[in-house]
């Protein structure tokens, strides 16, 4: 603990007996001291993530410290519990890391590497990856069904599952509630109901919805109270333990209670800013931590990519800009008649907030319920001439496969934007990688039109939307969390600028070559272009093909590359399910037999930002080395 600037050795390892629901003065004082100590620590080490530029979600773990301190004391008192801090809000990972440290599994100084590349402290807990972490949370709202199974495997034990009003919006929690009640499982949910999610306040955008009433309606015993009232919180937890079957302990509190500048704000959901953290730490007597935080520097990626300009932009936001420009050509009456945008609490991350701001009359702010929201957009777009628009993270595409099938069977018109594709800038790590995007193309050959698009730069994103925006069918547009540079032609001009027109289904020659071709798309294209330019400098005449329409075969281009000596696909999608897993078959089916290889994401992530690409061997150096292999 000595290298950590907050004295975690002061943590008091008390025991609490759930048969006695009243705290003694000594127990209360110890709990309060532990709560303050751990909240200080969470603010500090998550803020190192802010200083390093990797983000890090402070509010959720900060909020739930009181209940976690009580759980820890209960676990220490008895073998009647499964002693795991199961949590279905994976972004509260700081809780898992702090408790791993307090339990002796993780050195305290490691906390200051929070979410850094190769630190093994990613943005969601991953079993077997971080010392002391005992489960992988996956995405929001995925743990309660899993904990039900753990409860079935541990009869006679009490299990806790930390939840939130956000995670409870996911439909699988409703299924979990029904099973827990039907089987009388001894699962105790401890739900932080702070009325905050990423995009706003559930009481505003889901009017009429109550977490407590929903759970009660499913047959779960509900105990509501103030999460900051320590005596009442402990009493309700004891009551839950002594009540057979599933119980939900719902704790109302503002987000980030006591943090000046964040309390009650949606900004508290993400990482605390360095400025706010410094003010907090100094006001709580943690000067050493504040001094350390001031010294944290963000790592810089100094790489220069040949073939790209020095102009970078986020395609996920360009999607919103382009949509606003297109919708602006319609009258308000036409927009209301023809278009509806359904958000899943990620409008700020997917660029949809720009549509919300410009044209609120067609925008629906909805909750964290991707399946239902996609289907709502599809239902609106069932009639010819109407257009549903949907957006969320690419990692959540896997959750919508059945709904995508139903939309196709109903000839729906849906334009979907799945941002955060691939692995770039993904400190949340493996569970938030957008790897299996090709799953969206799950229809039959004669099915309703389904096209998958991954524009390479901001200019192509805009051109792509201009072409496909009002096309019938299902259209999936992918973008990354990271910014991408503008692609240049061999004369140094913007490749997708000027009079460029996007043609759906057509591949594009970015560079000609005689030694073979690299085929790429999205954020892997500019990295591949850099590799191509450097190989050409070495006398190896490699060509580069951009395939912005991922699932449509361009027969002319396939013939062109199929007659070359070598073809290598470079992508950040899953190597098992991505473009590379298909293109080899496409070539063979047509009698083309170039030497073939494909690179993609194939191992668990390393955290951090751009570091994910060299970790997978798909950075320019890895691409060059792979192409040069015999």
Image (cartoon, rainbow, N blue to C red):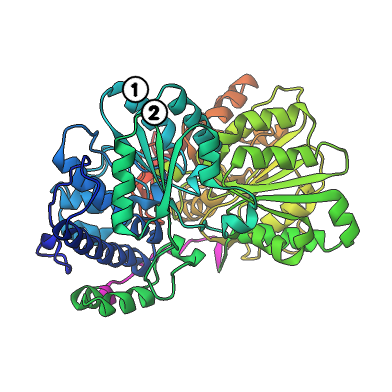
Q: In this rendering, does residue 459 appear at all?
A: no
Magenta highlight on residue 236: no
In the picture of the structure, the residue carrying the numbered disc 1 is 152
Residue 304 is a magenta residue: yes
Against 293, residue 96 (above or below) is above
C-beta proximity under 8 Å, tags 1 and 2: yes
Check the picture and name the quadrant holding the N terminus.
bottom left
- Comparing 390 with 157, the one in front is 157
Please state if 306 lies on the left or on the right of 209 as rendered: left
User: Is 544 or 173 nearer to us in this picture?
Assistant: 173
Mark 2 surroundings within 10 Å by alpha-carbon count, few (fewer than 14), some (14 through 19), many (20 or more): many
Task: Find residue 433 and report its horizontal and vertical position in percent.
Answer: 46, 44
Residue at 27% x, 75% y is: 281
Name the main secondary structure of what is drawn in magenta. Answer: loop
Whether residue 597 is situated above or below residue 430 in the rendered picture: above
Which residue lies at the image location 14% right of the left edge and 59% below the top edge? 26
Q: Which residues are magenta?
A: 293-310
Query: Where does label 2 land, which residue?
Result: 148
Residue at image location 26% in from the left, 28% down from the top: 157
């Amino acid at each position: 603990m000595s290298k950590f600037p907050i004295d975690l050795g002061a943590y008091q390892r008390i025991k609490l007996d759930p048969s006695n629901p009243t705290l003694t003065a000594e127990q209360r004082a110890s709990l309060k001291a532990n709560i303050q100590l751990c909240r200080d620590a969470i603010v500090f080490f998550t803020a190192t993530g802010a200083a390093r530029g990797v983000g890090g979600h402070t509010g959720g773990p900060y909020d739930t410290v009181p209940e976690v301190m009580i759980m820890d004391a209960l676990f220490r008192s008895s073998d009647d519990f499964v002693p795991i801090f199961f949590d279905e809000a994976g972004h509260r990972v700081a809780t898992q890391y702090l408790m791993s440290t307090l339990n002796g599994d993780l050195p305290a100084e490691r906390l200051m590497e929070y979410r850094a590349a190769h630190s093994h402290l990613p943005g969601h807990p991953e079993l077997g990856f971080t010392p002391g972490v005992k489960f992988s949370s996956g995405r929001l709202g995925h743990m309660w069904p899993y904990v039900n199974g753990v409860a079935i495997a541990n009869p006679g034990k009490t299990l806790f599952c930390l939840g939130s009003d956000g995670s409870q919006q996911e439909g699988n929690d409703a299924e979990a509630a029904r099973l827990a009640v039907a089987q009388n499982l001894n699962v105790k949910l401890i739900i932080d109901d702070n009325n905050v999610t990423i995009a706003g306040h559930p009481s505003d955008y889901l009017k009429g919805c109550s977490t407590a009433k929903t759970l009660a309606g499913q047959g779960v015993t509900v105990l509501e109270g103030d999460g900051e009232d320590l005596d009442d919180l402990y009493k309700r937890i004891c009551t839950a333990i002594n009540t057979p079957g599933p119980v939900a302990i719902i704790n109302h509190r503002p987000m980030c209670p006591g943090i000046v500048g964040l309390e009650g704000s949606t900004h508290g959901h993400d990482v605390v800013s360095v400025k706010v953290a410094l003010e907090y730490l100094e006001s709580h007597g943690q000067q050493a931590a504040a001094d350390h935080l001031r010294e944290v520097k963000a790592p810089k990626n100094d790489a220069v990519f040949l073939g790209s300009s020095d102009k970078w932009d986020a395609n996920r936001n360009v999607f919103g800009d382009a949509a606003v420009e297109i919708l602006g050509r319609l009258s308000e009456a036409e927009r209301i008649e023809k278009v509806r945008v359904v958000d899943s609490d990620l409008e700020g991350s997917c660029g949809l907030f720009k549509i919300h701001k410009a044209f609120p009359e067609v925008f629906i702010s909805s909750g964290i319920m991707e399946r239902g929201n996609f289907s709502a957009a599809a239902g609106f777009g069932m009639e010819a001439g109407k257009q549903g628009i949907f957006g969320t993270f690419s990692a959540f595409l896997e959750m919508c496969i059945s709904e995508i099938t139903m939309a196709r069977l109903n000839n729906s018109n849906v334009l979907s934007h799945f941002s955060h594709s691939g692995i770039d800038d993904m400190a949340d790590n493996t569970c938030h990688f957008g790897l299996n995007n090709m799953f969206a193309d799950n229809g039959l050959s004669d099915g309703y039109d389904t096209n998958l698009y991954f524009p390479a730069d901001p200019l192509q994103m805009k051109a792509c939307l201009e072409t496909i925006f009002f096309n019938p069918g299902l259209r999936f547009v992918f973008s990354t969390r990271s910014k991408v540079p503008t692609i240049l032609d061999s004369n140094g001009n913007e490749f997708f600028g000027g009079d460029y027109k996007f043609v759906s289904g057509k591949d594009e020659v970015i560079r000609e070559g005689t030694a073979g071709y690299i085929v790429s798309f999205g954020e892997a294209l500019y990295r591949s272009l850099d590799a191509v330019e450097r190989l050409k400098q070495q006398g190896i005449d490699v060509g580069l093909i951009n395939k912005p329409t991922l699932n449509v075969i361009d027969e002319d281009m396939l013939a062109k590359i199929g007659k070359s000596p070598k073809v290598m696909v470079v992508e950040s999608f899953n190597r098992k399910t991505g473009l590379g897993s298909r293109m080899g078959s496409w070539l063979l089916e047509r009698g083309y037999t170039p030497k073939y290889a494909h690179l993609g994401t194939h191992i668990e992530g390393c955290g951090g930002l751009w570091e994910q690409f060299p970790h997978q061997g798909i950075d320019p150096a890895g691409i060059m080395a792979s192409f040069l292999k015999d």
